[in-house]
Amino acid sequence: MSTNQLDKKSQAWSALFSEPMSELVKRYTASVFFDKRLWLADITGSLAHAEMLAAQGIIGADDRAAIERGMAQIRSEIEAGTFEWKLDLEDVHLNIEARLTQLVGDAGKRLHTGRSRNDQVATDVRLWLRGEIDLISDLLKELQTALVDVAEKNVEVILPGFTHLQVAQPVSFAHHLLAYVEMFARDAERMADVRRRTNRLPLGSAALAGTTYPLDRERVAVTLGMVDDKGVAQVCQNSLDGVSDRDFAIEFTAAASLCMVHISRFSEELILWMSQNFGFVKIADRFTTGSSIMPQKKNPDVPELARGKTGRVFGHLMGLLTLMKGQPLAYNKDNQEDKEPLFDTVDTLKDTLRIFCEMVGGQLNPANGQKEGGITVNAQAMEDAAKKGYATATDLADYLVKKGLPFRDAHETVAHAVKAATSHACDLSELPLAVLQGFNASIEKDVYECLSLRGSLNARNTLGGTAPAQVLTQIARHRTRLA
Ligand code: ARG
């Protein structure tokens, strides 16, 4: 190729410039070493644009064919790792366009008709993020399924439920896990919602004001799958907003942050449950590490790191919000800074979800088709712990209410009973009937039914409660929802 304009521009942008960029400024302004990751979205967007330009008679069918041929070649070069990314060419867009022109000549130079890098990059990021949201949604589904699988095996396992990290009331371990399923289900809903607003087409906004060419933006949107549930093209309706809106990236990072909040809460519980003082669960050794000095140690590094990485995702959310704050319309180079936080948020969230899927649910053993090596539950340790903190005290109060006492009086009566049990260093259920009757004469033998952990559990049989019957209903609902 005798004249590759873009290569020339890498010396100085155009005839307008009297000197080339300094090396420092080149490095400072270039984004290719991180935004090259958008290459597939960039090619996909360009092909849709070229198809429309040809359909509208803005470029020839031969140009379109040449562009397709060149892009196919570029694609295989990138996939093979032979594509030469040049810092001089600043970003992924200029690198691909320059190579295209090198390969197919003038057709390559026609591709940018009616387009600017401003609407191009906004389109690329949206296309790329849409794909990542889909992967994240799959992982969220997988994690929920893994949790439901463990829950199903532990419906009757009793865990001390805490408030203020003090024993409160017994709960089914399955019920506790299903609380996380609810959180991850909402995360998935949020992702689906963000996807709807991400999946809109900025292309055709050009630099900021639209373009003089008779573009068919709806056609491009349909080609790129930027359509709603009914197949209607989703196109950014204001060119200034189209090139400068990064709400979708912020929303995504906010949704990712909330998901990490949930992961970090679960991590914290795993860390507690794994400590010697609890001993409720074990995670497979491959998710733990030893200590270089203390030979007995198995540290829950994976949950701890997940808890730590939550902070970095929050940081990206703050970074993106601050990046947008006070930017005048329309595109500003500030926006180039949206990529690294967004990429790192996606990477962190995906890796974390992947690792949690496996840590909770285990790995598929192809020999027997079973998942193995997930979370191991020590039901006895949980139940023993639930016996410690007078977890059925509320049940005794409820018992007295059913005998006709006002709740406040029942509450006070039980406080006396707990005091007595504490001084005898025994559980309420271990106090003799005569002693219990000393607190209230209406207490009968059947009280022991409600003082048992299992009786307490079974009694909470209202929608959303911890009774095994309710938990099984929820498991069935989740199964249908996740099928
Ligand atoms: N690399 C740029 C970015 O990520 C592409 C858009 C550049 N547009 C411009 N007018 N300099 O934002």
Image (cartoon, rainbow, N blue to C red):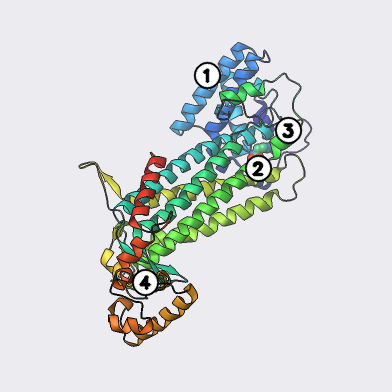
- In the rendered structure, which amino acid carries the disc numbered 3? Asn
Alpha carbon distance from label 3 to label 2: 14 Å
Callouts 3 and 2 close, C-beta under 8 Å? no
Q: Is residue 214 above or below residue 171?
A: above
Q: Which residue is mark 4?
A: 392
Mark 4 lies within 8 Å of ligand 1 (Cβ measured)? no
Please tell me whether mark 4 sits on a helix, a strand or a loop.
loop
Residue drawn at (50%, 40%) of the image: 132
Marks 3 and 1 sit apart, C-alpha to C-alpha, by: 33 Å
In this picture, residue 380 sits left or right of residue 477: left
At 39% from the left edge and 52% from the top edge, which residue is drawn?
Answer: 356
Identified at 50% across, 52% down, the residue is 259
Residue visible at 46% across and 27% down? 76
Residue type at mark 1 is Arg
Q: Which residue is mark 1?
A: 69
Label 2 and label 4: CA atoms lie apart by: 52 Å
Nearest to viewer (mark 1 / mark 2): 2
Judging from the image, what secondary structure is the residue with disc 1 in? helix
Distance from disc 4 to disc 3, alpha carbons, whole Å, reads 61 Å
| Looking at the image, residue 346 lies above or below residue 65 | below
Q: Kindly tell me whether residue 22 is visible in this rendering.
A: no
- Single out the mark in the foreground, 3 or 1: 3
Q: Earlier in the sequence, mark 4 or mark 3?
A: 3
Residue type at tag 2: Arg
Q: Position of residue 65 (x, y in %)?
A: 56, 15
Of callouts 1 and 2, the N-terminal one: 1
Residue that sits furthest to the bottom in the current view: 423
Residue 221 located left or right of residue 387 = right
